[in-house]
Each structure stands twice: as structure tokens, then as C-alpha cells.
Image: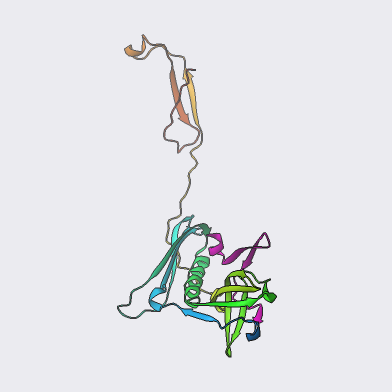
């Protein structure tokens, strides 16, 4: 959840864990001559994509009570609204989660275009999570690599999804949470006194025991419990 909450990529590279922020900014261009074959492009149907993203979290500005923020694309009348709902075990503010919901929503729409291609080992240093520009047939595709599988002889089969830097930028302001401020009242300690008294009830006259009086240290004290340990 933390990787999703802060839009971070995590991959294993050269026996090490590599963490990097998702930015959508291309780090290099792969030209036609470096491709072992034409790029295969797949585009998901719009009916399969979410039109609303709703995120639940603990609002640090609202006494850490549960809250939700959402982002939605404009839909046509009668159109089915596919929704992504996600629960975050995270304490943060409404602006962060509102902006995150928009980023997740528009990432899904941007990444509906996926690519498969093959490279020579010249580009063996590229890892999943890296963003490159693929040149193919006069078109440039800015792509985030999602997989790279080295094959013999000397080929790397790669998969990726479309991306762009604007997807990871948002200025949304979160909806304010309505809540009543809770006031904790300090009631103080419960004090007690063991009373040296004769039996006050006939039922107590034949039973070994003693009376105890309890009272509060502060004026708003209401009651207390005395526990006896006979070990």
C-alpha cells in the first residue's frame, strides 16, 4: 500500500532492491535500429477502465477518523461507472488522498495502451520501472517498462505501458471531513482508605473482612473499582 500511496516503483535489480518514484519522464530513446522486431501495441476497451477511484484512510486533520476521497471522470448518461476502491492503513491528509485518487484514475487511463517489443543486449541495463521513448515507424511511444526477460540468443523481450509526466501531477484539494472535536477529560486517580470499623451489617458479623472507602482525586471523578488479591 505504501508504494501505491506514494507512487513508487520497487524492483529487484542485480540482486538488490531498487526503489524509484514514478515520474513518467523518459530517461532515454530507443531507436528503430535497436528493436529486433516491430512493436506490438494493445489497447484496452474504455468499458474496462475505471471512471471513479475512491480511497479510504485515516484523516490526521480529523482526529484520525476514517475518511474517503475520490476522483471521477465525466460519464455519459446511463453509462456504467467502473470503480476502484482501496483501503489504506495510512494516516494522512485529505489533499494527499484526493490527489492520489486522481493520479490512480488517470494512470489507469494512460496505461490502457500496452507494448511488447524485443531488444538486443545493448540495453540489458534497463530495469522494470524505467521510462523510455520507443521510436517505431515515425511514432514515439513514452513507455514505462513493466517486464524484461533475457532470451537466447542475445535478445531481451520487454513489456511496458504508456505513461506521461502529467499523470503524476495533481492540484486537487481534498473534501473536508466533518467531525466533532473530542475532548479528553482527566478524572485523576482513585484513592481508597481501609476503614477500622465494627460490622455495619448483620451479614458481615460472621465473615472476616474489612470495609474500604474510595474517592476521587479530582472533582469530576464519578466511581471506582477495588480489586482484592488473596494470593
Observer-nearest residue: 125 or 201? 125
Number of marks in the rendered image: 0
Does the image show residue 128?
no
Observer-nearest residue: 27 or 54? 27
Residue 189 rendering spot, x and y as whole percentages: 51, 33
Residue 37 rendering spot, x and y as whole percentages: 58, 82
Q: Which residues are magenta?
A: 1-29
Judged from this view, the residue extending furthest toward the top is 206
Residue 211 rendering spot, x and y as whole percentages: 43, 18
Q: Is residue 113 above or below residue 147?
A: below
Judged from this view, the residue extending furthest toward the bottom is 138
Residue 90 rendering spot, x and y as whole percentages: 52, 57
Observer-nearest residue: 102 or 211? 102
In percent of the image, x 60 and y 82: which residue is there? Answer: 134
Would residue 52 appear left or right of 35 to someone viewing this image? left
Q: Is residue 96 above or below residue 198?
A: below
Q: In terms of image quadrants, where is residue 30?
A: bottom right
Does the image show residue 221?
yes
Q: In terms of image quadrants, where is residue 53?
A: bottom left
The reply to whether the magenta stretch includes residue 128 is: no
Observer-nearest residue: 145 or 176? 145
Q: Is residue 85 above or below residue 231?
A: below
Q: How is the image coloured?
A: rainbow
Would residue 150 appear left or right of 190 to someone viewing this image? right
Amino acid at each position: 500500500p505504501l508504494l501505491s500511496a506514494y507512487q513508487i516503483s520497487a524492483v529487484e535489480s542485480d540482486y538488490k532492491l531498487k526503489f524509484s518514484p514514478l515520474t513518467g519522464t523518459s530517461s532515454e530513446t530507443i531507436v528503430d535500429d535497436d528493436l529486433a522486431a516491430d512493436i506490438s501495441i494493445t489497447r484496452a476497451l474504455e468499458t474496462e477502465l475505471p471512471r471513479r477511484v475512491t480511497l479510504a484512510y485515516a484523516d490526521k486533520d480529523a482526529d484520525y477518523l476514517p475518511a474517503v476521497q475520490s476522483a471521477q471522470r465525466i460519464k455519459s448518461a446511463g453509462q456504467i461507472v467502473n470503480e476502484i476502491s482501496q483501503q489504506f492503513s495510512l494516516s494522512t491528509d485529505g489533499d494527499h488522498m484526493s490527489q492520489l485518487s486522481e493520479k490512480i484514475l488517470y494512470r489507469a487511463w494512460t496505461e490502457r495502451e500496452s507494448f511488447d517489443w524485443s531488444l538486443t543486449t545493448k540495453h540489458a541495463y534497463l530495469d522494470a520501472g524505467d521510462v523510455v521513448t520507443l521510436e517505431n515507424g515515425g511514432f514515439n511511444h513514452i513507455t514505462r517498462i513493466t517486464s524484461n526477460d533475457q532470451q537466447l540468443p542475445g535478445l531481451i523481450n520487454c513489456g511496458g505501458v504508456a505513461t506521461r509526466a502529467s499523470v503524476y501531477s495533481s492540484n486537487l484539494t481534498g473534501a473536508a471531513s466533518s467531525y466533532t472535536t473530542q475532548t479528553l477529560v482527566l478524572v485523576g486517580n482513585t484513592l481508597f482508605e481501609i476503614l477500622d470499623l465494627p460490622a455495619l451489617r448483620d451479614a458481615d458479623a460472621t465473615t472476616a473482612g474489612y470495609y474500604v472507602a474510595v474517592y476521587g482525586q479530582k472533582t469530576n471523578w464519578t466511581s471506582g473499582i477495588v480489586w482484592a488479591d488473596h494470593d
